[in-house]
Amino acid sequence: MLPKSNQKLPYLLERVRIDDFAAEGKCLSRIDGEVLFVEGFAAPGDLADVRVFKKKKNFREGQMVALHEPSNLRVTPECEHFGTCGGCKWQHVDYAAQLDFKARHVRDALERIGKIDLPPIQPILGAPEIYFYRNKLEFTFSSLRWLTDEEIKQTDEVNRNAAGFHVPRRFDRVLDIRRCHLQPDPSNAIRLALKNYADEQGLSFYDVVKQQGFLRLLTIRTSSTGQVMVVVQVAEPDELATAGVMDFLKSHFPEITSLHYALNQKGNDTMHDLDVICWAGTPYIEEEMEGLRFRIGPKSFYQTNSAQAYQLYRVARDFAQLSGDELVYDLYTGTGTIANFVARQVRKVVGLEYVPAAVEDAHVNSVVNGITNTAFFAGDMKKLLTPGFFSAQGHPDVVITDPPRAGMDLEVVLALLDAAPQRIVYVSCNPATQARDLALLDGQYAVTAVQPVDMFPHTHHVENVVGLVRR
C-alpha cells in the first residue's frame, strides 16, 4: 500500500512487485490504482524495495534499492561495468523480452496516440548480434574518474584519469572502461592503448569543470568493409604532444585506415563546427550495401548498427512499392543513404536535409556509385517544401521520410498533404511522435503496413517503419 500523499520524501516501499516495462527504459508497478515508475536495473516480475523520490498527482517515481525475488526474465549481464555505466540498461533482461516490450511500445503508441486504423503489425525484426553491433563510439578522456566506494575510502592517492563514458546524471564523472561490449575490435584495444600511452607520457586528461587539460575525446568508427576511423579531440594547441599521439596510433594500429585529430576548446564535445585534420590514411571510411559504397567522414551521420540499417532500408524500399518510374522525395536524407539505396529502382530521387555538409556527402555518395538520377538540397524542410519547389522538381509519387526524434514539423506534414504523393513511407526512431504525425495524415492516407526494427539491443530504443497509401 502506498503511503499518504503527504508522506515526506524520500521514503522506502518494501517488497514491491514490478509489473512491466515503461517508457524511457524504466519499469512500473501499480499500487492502489496508482502508477509507480521505477528506475534502476529492475525487470518485470522482480520483487524489490523501492526508494520513492518524487510524487505527482497521478504517479510516483522511485529507484530500486534491493532485490528480494528475481524475475524469470533476468539473465546474467555480459559486461563487467553493468550497473554503473548507463549505456546498456537492459543487459539483465532476456533479449526476447526486450523485443516483446519494444513491439508492444510501438503498438501502444500508434493506438493510444495515433488513434488510427492499423493493419496487423509485423513481428519485430530483432538484431542478429546483440553485442558488438555499433559502428561508432565516443570515449571521453577525463581527469575526474568515477571512484568505487573502496577507492573513496583509501588514504593513498589514486589515479583519477579515465577513458570511458559519463556516469548517468554526472556530467563531471567518467567511468573508466576496461572492455566495452558495444563495438567490435579493435575499438577496446585502441582506447586502452591510447590511455596507457597518455599516462606514460604524462599527458593531462581533460577536466570538464575547470575546462582545461589536453586529451579530450576519442571517436572510433568501424565498418563492414573492415576499415577503421579514429578521431582524437585535444583541448590544448600542443603540436608536439598531438604529433606524438597521432604517430603512436599510426605505428601501433596499422588497421586504422583513416586517422584524424581536432582542436576543441569549446564548452561541448560536438565536432560539426571543428576543423578536423586528416593525419594519415584516407579522409573517410566506407560502408557497403548491395554493392553500393557509402563514404563516411569524421562528421558524417550513418546509422550506428550497420547490419540492422540494411534491414531497415530494405523494409522502407519494400513499403515504397517501387516499379521503376517513380519520382521519390527522401526527406531528412542525411548523407543520402536511403536516396542512393533506392535510386536504381526509380526514375529520380530528390533528397532534402537541414545540414549542408551532409548534403555534400550525399552528392559524393551518388558520384562514387555512378548514380546520376539524384538531386540534393540543403535547408529548413518546412521552408524548402513550397509550391514553387514542387513545381520545379516535380510532385512526388512516393515520399520517404526519416525525421529526428521530434518528428515532422506541422508545416512539413501540411506540405505532404498538399503534394499528395501516392505512397508515403515513414521511418521513425520515436513511435510517439510518429503516431502524432500519422494522425495528422490519416484524413488522406491509410496505414497499410507497420514493421518495428530493433537497432539497439539492451536499450529501450526502437525504430518503426510505416507504409501509407493515399485514400
Image (tube, rainbow, N blue to C red):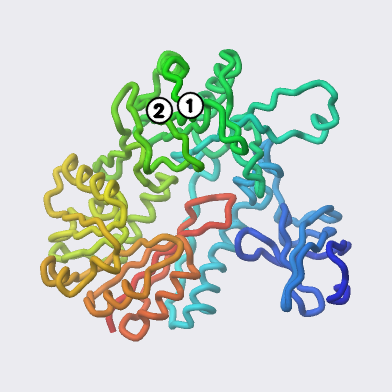
Query: Would residue 216 be visible to someone looking at this image?
Result: yes
In the shown orientation, is residue 56 left or right of residue 288?
A: right
Query: Would residue 1 be visible to someone looking at this image?
Result: no
Picture coordinates of residue 71, whole percent (x, y): 76, 57
Q: Which of label 1 and label 2 is nearer to you? A: 1
In the shown orientation, is residue 442 left or right of residue 182?
A: left
Picture coordinates of residue 208, whole percent (x, y): 59, 37
Q: Amino acid at mark 1?
A: Glu
Could you say whether the residue bearing mark 1 is in a helix, strand or loop? loop
Q: Residues within 10 Å of mark 1 (few under 14, many from 20)?
A: some
454 is higher (above) or lower (below) than 243: below
Picture coordinates of residue 29, whole percent (x, y): 75, 68
In the shown orientation, is residue 320 left or right of residue 20?
A: left
In the shown orientation, is residue 185 left or right of residue 326?
A: right
Quadrant where the image shows the C terminus: bottom left
| Residue corresponding to mark 2 | 261
Residue at the image position 24 percent from the left and 42 percent from the top = 291
1 is higher (above) or lower (below) than 307: below
Q: Circles 1 and 2: CB distance less than 8 Å?
A: no
Q: Give the mark, 1 or 2, whose residue is nearer the N terminus.
A: 1
Picture coordinates of residue 52, whole percent (x, y): 80, 63
Residue at the image position 39 percent from the left and 29 percent from the top = 228
Q: Residues within 10 Å of mark 2 (few under 14, many from 20)?
A: many
Q: Amino acid at mark 2?
A: Tyr
Quadrant where the image shows the N terminus: bottom right
Residue at the image position 44 percent from the left and 39 percent from the top = 135
| Residue corresponding to mark 1 | 236
